[in-house]
């Protein structure tokens, strides 16, 4: 005859101080504790269990693990109970569902025990929501790191120390490093750094890696190779140690083209500066505040102001009209570039000179206005000669006009004389005929 099933609300024969101690300990656990029979009927639950799931104790005691497990786990309960009877204990993750439908991931530690004279399963369920959130966050961060790791333009190689840093093997490398080193990651992982990249010792980079591993201090380390005095390869390396694992990371990029272009740009700039410095036209540049940045020899010769006197000064120190009334460079009304504009300047000696100037903006790589450039030539003597020539032309025109007037008068007199002679001839002829 089967034993009589006990009333779940009545804990049974235990009583007194022992029962009170059990009840106190049972309900003081931060983890949810469930006791159910081998059929899956709950026999006892602690306070954490029913509060976490949002049920009253009486409600939960009338349920089973299948009712509180998420659907994808509920079907496995009976199978796990059978497995538990063979192993005596088991440990796994599952998911509980609250009365309101919230899913709570839990870590379940189950063991077969004797409870009130029958075999039962004691399960301690630890809420691992925060751990799962951290794991999810960690996975997301890992994915982000892996995306960044594989898609940044800089090469990244992670070196793992062996034998207390006596030598290193390649732990990981990104796609850029594969491209720069012309190797496939799968072929070099866990291989010795010196065997894979023999040149690393000769360049000094291997020594830098060992030093960073030993001291923990990050280090920038350029590796430059030259041929016939010209840069053949230039790599900028930044080496640092990971505090968590002790692994050494080298982040590097090939700046050969950049350095070559920079060197060529410097050469071109020097050539241009030499040309600008000695061209016959005065040339100077200004910033956005019209403060002079450069001042060539011709500008010094024409104005008398030296480069030292003019750098940092506003261009109105020597320019007069129309610049002092309105700056053509920054005026929205004046179309740029300005070509052949006549202006008045004042030399260091106070002389006023007339110049013809060209003006335009200086722009950065993105096309933004960062200042201006102006070239000018002194046309004072030219203007003076033009004035003198104009005056002479006007004088000649007056003389020509006067001479032209006299010539007309002479022609008129000649015509009058001719007319008188003709009349006199006709009169004499008439008189002869009458005599």
Image (cartoon, rainbow, N blue to C red):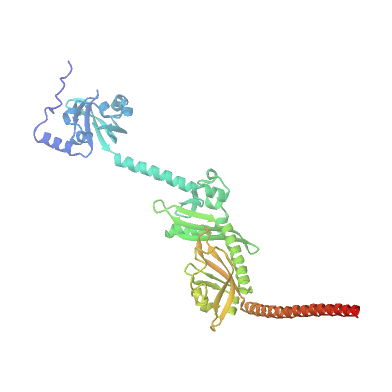
Q: Give above or below for 257 relative to 2.
A: below
The part of the image, by quadrant, that contains residue 394 is bottom right
Q: Residue at x 61, y 68 (%)?
A: 272
Residue 341 in percent (x, y) is at 58, 70
Which is more toward the observer, 93 or 328?
A: 328
Q: Foreground residue, 257 or 149?
A: 257
Whether residue 167 appears in this view of the structure is: yes
Residue 395 in the image, given as x and y percentages of width and height: 68, 80
Residue at 39 percent across and 43 percent down: it is 140
- Most foreground residue, 141 or 182: 141
Side of 188 relative to 95 (left or right): right
Q: Residue 132 in the image: x percent, y percent?
A: 33, 40
Residue 64: image x %, image y %?
24, 26
Q: Quadrant of residue 240?
A: bottom left
Q: Residue at x 84, y 80 (%)?
A: 424
Q: Classify the position of the C terminus by image quarter.
A: bottom right
Position above or below: 82 against 405: above
Q: Nearer the viewer, residue 111 or 56?
A: 56
Q: Quadrant of the N terminus?
A: top left
């Amino acid at each position: 005859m089967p034993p009589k099933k006990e009333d779940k609300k009545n804990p049974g024969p235990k009583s007194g101080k022992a029962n009170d101690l059990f009840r106190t300990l049972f309900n003081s656990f931060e983890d949810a504790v469930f006791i159910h029979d081998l059929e899956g009927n709950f026999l006892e639950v602690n306070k954490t269990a029913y509060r976490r799931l949002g049920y009253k104790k009486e409600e939960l005691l009338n349920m089973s693990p299948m009712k509180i497990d998420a659907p994808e786990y509920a079907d496995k309960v009976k199978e796990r109970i059978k497995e538990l009877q063979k192993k005596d204990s088991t440990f796994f993750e599952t998911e509980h569902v609250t009365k309101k439908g919230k899913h709570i991931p839990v870590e379940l530690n189950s063991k077969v025990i004797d409870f009130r004279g029958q075999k039962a399963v004691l399960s301690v369920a630890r809420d691992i929501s925060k751990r799962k959130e951290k794991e999810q966050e960690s996975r997301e961060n890992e994915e982000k790191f892996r995306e960044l790791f594989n898609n940044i333009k800089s090469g990244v190689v992670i070196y793992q120390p062996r034998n207390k840093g006596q030598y290193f093997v390649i732990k990981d490398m990104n796609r850029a490093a594969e491209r720069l080193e012309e190797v496939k990651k799968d072929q070099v992982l866990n291989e010795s750094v010196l065997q894979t990249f023999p040149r690393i010792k000769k360049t000094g980079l291997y020594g830098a890696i060992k030093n960073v591993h030993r001291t923990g201090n990050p280090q920038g380390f350029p590796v430059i190779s030259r041929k016939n005095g010209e840069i053949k390869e230039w790599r900028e390396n930044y080496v640092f140690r990971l505090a968590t694992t002790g692994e050494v990371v080298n982040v590097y990029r090939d700046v050969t083209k950049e350095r070559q272009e920079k060197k060529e740009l410097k050469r071109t700039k020097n050539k241009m500066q030499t040309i600008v410095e000695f061209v016959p036209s005065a040339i100077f540049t200004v910033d956005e505040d019209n403060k002079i940045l450069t001042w060539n020899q011709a500008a010094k010769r024409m104005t008398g102001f030296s480069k030292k006197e003019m750098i940092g000064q506003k261009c109105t120190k020597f320019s007069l009209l129309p610049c002092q009334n309105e700056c053509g460079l920054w005026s929205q009304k004046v179309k740029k570039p300005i070509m052949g504009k006549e202006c008045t300047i004042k030399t260091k000696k106070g002389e006023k000179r007339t110049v013809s100037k060209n003006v335009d903006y200086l722009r950065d790589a993105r096309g933004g206005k960062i200042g201006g450039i102006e070239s000018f030539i002194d046309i004072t003597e030219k203007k003076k000669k033009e004035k003198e020539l104009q005056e002479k032309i006007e004088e000649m025109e007056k003389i020509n006009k006067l001479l032209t007037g006299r010539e007309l008068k002479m022609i008129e007199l000649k015509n009058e004389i001719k007319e008188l002679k003709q009349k006199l001839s006709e009169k004499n002829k008439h008189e002869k005929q009458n005599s």
